[in-house]
Image: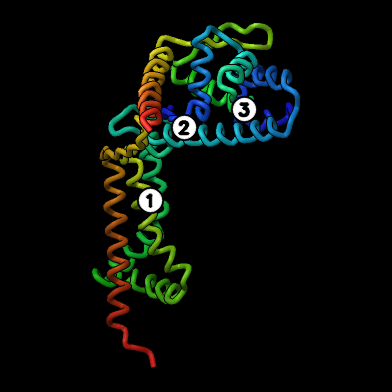
Amino acid sequence: MAPSAQPGSDPGLLILISLAGGPKHGHAILTDVAAFAGVRLGPGTLYGALARLEEAGQIAALPPDGRRRPYRLTGAGEEVLGERLGSLALALDAGLARVGSR
Amino acid sequence: MRWLLRLYPRRWRDRYEAELLALVDDLPPSPAIAVDLIRGAGREHARSLARALTSSLRTAGGPPTSDPFGRHPTAWAMVAVVVLSPSLALVGVSLLAFQLAVPALAGLADPILAAIDGWLVANVVLLGGPVLAVLLAAIPMLRIALAHTEGELRLTVGFRPRVVNLAVLLVAALVGAILVGYLATELLLEPPRA
């Protein structure tokens, strides 16, 4: 998945951040993402991103809980999330320093 | 709203439909959700198409895939022979009749040539046959792969020669060259019409 400079425009990154807090099913991810990022993901967008992340081995499906199936972050997903947040942090630091120096 | 999930590809639905349905049932229906599901279905069809296209092509020297050309190279060479056969028959008969002066064939070739002279469809079939046959014989020997790695789309092309396909390709190219040569000579030598 291509990195995005804007976390809000990258459902994959938002899902990884949400799952870093523990396994969640679709509805819980939507609620969590809306709470920490203020982004309302649609169900089609969410499941498109979940499918890609699962295919990439960054998340894994857990046994279903009724009709809902929770997902968890994998080791590979944790690594990718760390790298992407690291690059975002660098950009954020540089941006804040430049804005602050004005 | 549930019926919108039927827009997704079958294989995708087999894996995700039940849980997506549970999520859609939990959300209040809205036009935004409908639009999001339609867009999602379009995206999954595009991905599924891209995946099918990529897997139908082969990596150079790589393992066989579902590529219909690569899996049956001889069969495609035979199809090429069938496509080539009208042109091959005409060139063969003409060569025997006029170059080797076989009288029995001259009697056969003359009416055929007279019949197709100026008939556009026949000329297109006769000239297009060798071109199509070359492609049909050559494509199964190519190993083409599209790979999307690190944000870049890479195309690799390999070649795995096969005796039958090469033979058909050479004959088709020869027949095509003879026909083009014949046509060019006829056009150059034919006196301009008043």
Disc 3 with disc 1 on a shared chain: no
The reply to whether residue A65 is visible in this rendering is: yes
Which class describes the residues within 10 Å of circle 3: few (<14), some (14-19), or many (20+)?
many
| In the image: residue A49, left or right of residue A101 | right
- Expressed as whole percent of the image width and height from the top left, the position of residue A8 reads 52, 27
Amino acid found under the numbered disc labelled 3:
Gly
Question: Where's residue B55, x and y in %?
Answer: 42, 32
Q: CA distance from mark 3 to mark 2?
A: 19 Å
What is the chain letter for disc 3?
A
Question: Callout 1: helix, strand or loop?
Answer: helix
Does residue B51 lie above or below B15 as drawn?
below
Q: Which mark is residue B81?
A: 1
Q: What is the chain letter for disc 1?
A: B
| Label annotation for residue A44 | 3
Q: Foreground residue, A26 or A54?
A: A26
Return the disc, 1 or 2, that comes first in the chain's sequence: 2
Figure disc tally? 3
The amino acid pointed to by label 2 is Arg
- Between circles 3 and 2, the one closer to the viewer is 3
Q: Residue at x 56, y 26 (%)?
A: A48
Whether B178 is drawn above or below B158: the answer is below
Say which quadrant the C terminus of chain B sits in.
Answer: bottom left
Tell whether label 1 touches label 3 (CB within 8 Å).
no
Q: Looking at the image, do the residues carrying marks 3 and 2 touch, with CB atoms under 8 Å apart? A: no
For mark 2, what is the residue? B51
Rounded to the nearest angstrom, the CA distance separating label 3 from label 1 is: 49 Å
Q: CA distance from mark 1 to mark 2?
A: 32 Å
Please name the residue shown 44% across and 20% down the image: A56
